[in-house]
Structure formats: structure tokens, C-alpha cells
Amino acid sequence: LEYCLEGARSAVSFALPLDRDHIRAFLAKEDRIAHEKDNIDTNIRATTVSWELAEKLQEDGYNSKGTMANLKYRTEVKDWQLTLPPDISHRYMAVRSGVGSFGWSGNVGVKGHGTAIILGTTITAAELEPTESIPEDESFCDRCKLCVSACAVEMFEKKEEMSVTIGGVSFSHSARKDYLRCDYCCGGFTGLARSGKWSTWSPGRLQVPDEYDLLFKEFVRGVELYRERPSLPGGFPHPALKDYKQHLTCGNCQIICWGDKEDTRENVKLLHGSGCVLQKPDGELYALPPEEAEAAFESMDPERKKLYC
């Protein structure tokens, strides 16, 4: 907390829900823009709420500061462009304060909403009475692990766990193979699942090597190819890459879980049956069943094709 505000003594954590109708249209490859806009708007709203609460605490005589819900990183950390370390972990604040709990994916969720939420935090010098974390047997997550199957680059381990201790309390969730996989996929550089049966909203079909050095080379190559592809509507500036506009093409591990196994299972079914995304020369994205998508991709002009593989 001291990193963000000198003299900080407390943090106020909260969560805002994402629109479920937009999520399902996104997962089914029916509409990308509506969920992207809702996601951006909800992040802006969370940031606004954070600053409004800080102003109220300031009026009451307590030095306070609002924080950005996303896209604010510690640029003094070496290689921060790859690790994207936040100035404050909204997840850790939410879990330790009892706003939510970790799902198997490591995303934070709440009962009735799952992990399809956006978190926010206000930091203050006020000595607020702390609230306790949610007991494990009261968590929204029953470890169905359906979230694992929502990641096109297989970042999450299905059996192995990792843990983190926050304020003297330990929490656990799935171990991750490598965070670079997330940058690679959620950045939109690639998106085809290893099975070839479905994809994210990214038209990229790059390889996902298991060895880190090879993965890093593919990641760098993917960034350069991305810059040469036709632009998409919407998007937002990426703080780590100059002149790079990011678009929401994934985030599936977060939005797939609604805290109810049947709802989540339906979301996974929509995603896995949504087909594979291709891009037209004018930038438009469209999805086809896997076999048709493969045939269409192979029939592309070689110069266009090399932008995606």
C-alpha cells in the first residue's frame, strides 16, 4: 500500500459485475464489441468509484487515493512489459478483505457472479476495521475446474496448486505454466486452441511451444505479425507496447465462470462450439466451424496467411 500512498493503513475493496448477455454473445462468437465495451466501461466505473470514495475520505480528513482498475503497472520493475506487475493487486485486496475468494483459475469471484467481475480498490491512511477473508467452505468455487478448458494456450495446471500468503492467511489456486502464455493469447497475438477445434477472437494460429525460450521467440514474432494485420474496430492503448492498440479477444478464464456449475458448463459449451476465427482483408473477424476454417485459412493468399502463423 505504501507504494501507492505514503502512510497508507487500509484498503477498501469492491467488485462490479460484467454484463452476462454480452459475455455469452462474446463466447459464442456472435458479438465481440459489446463485451469489449462493457468491460472497458466497467473498468472505468470501478476506477471512478475508487476515486470518488477517496475524495469522500479526504473530506473526512484522511489522506486517501483512488487506483486504476487496470492497465497501471510498476514500470521501474525490470522487464515489466512482460510481467505487467500492477501498482496494487486488486485480487489480493479482495481476497484478504472477504470481498471475494480465489477460483481455481486464480481469478477472484463472488457468489452469484463467479469471476465475471471487475475489482476496484481505494487506499487510505484511515485505520479502518478489517474484515476477514471468506472461509474456504463458503467460497463460490467448488473446484469443478471447467475454467481450465477455457484457456486456448493451456496456462493452468489441472491438478497442481500454488499458494500465496496475504496478511498471515494462505490461499491457493491452480499453478500456472507460464504467465507469458497469457500475454501471448490475451494480447491477441494467437488464439487457436491446441486441438484446432475452437479459438479465441484472435485470428492468430501461432505455435505455443512448451519450452520458455521458444515460446518467447514466438511471442516476439507474434507481436510483430500483429502490427501488420488489418486493424480492428474498438480497442484501447496498451501501456507496455508503443503504438499498439489492444483489443479484447480473450479473457475467457475470467468470464467463463458464473459461480454456478450449470451456467459455467453452458458457457464452456458455447466457447468450444463457437468455431475458429479468421480475418478478412478489411479487418473484419468472422468464425467458421473448425474444418471450414482450416480450409479457408489454407486457401488464403500466402502473403496474408503468413500474418497469422
Image (cartoon, rainbow, N blue to C red):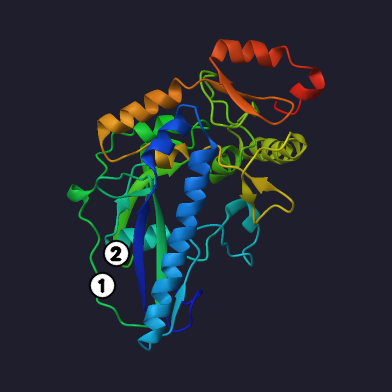
Res 276 → quadrant: top right
Q: Residues within 10 Å of mark 2 (few under 14, many from 20)?
A: many
Q: Is residue 280 above or below residue 156?
A: above
Above or below, 84 against 8 in this view is: above
Q: x, y (%) of residue 308?
A: 70, 27
Q: Residue visible at 51% across and 32% down? A: 31
The part of the image, by quadrant, that contains residue 165 is bottom left
Three-letter residue code for mark 2: Ser
Residue ranking furthest to the bottom = 61
Write the residue at 63% across / 64% down: 75
Q: Which residue is mark 2?
A: 97
* The N terminus - image quarter: bottom left
Q: Secondary structure at mark 1?
A: loop
Disc tally is 2
Residue depicted at x 49% and y 37%: 155
Tell me if residue 306 comes above or below residue 64 in the rendering.
Answer: above
Report x, y in % for residue 186.
56, 40
Residue 268 percent across, percent down from the top left: 38, 28
Where is the C terminus found, in terms of image quarters? top right
Does residue 157 appear anywhere in the picture? Answer: no
Q: Say whether residue 131 is left or right of residue 161.
A: left
Residue bearing mark 1 = 130
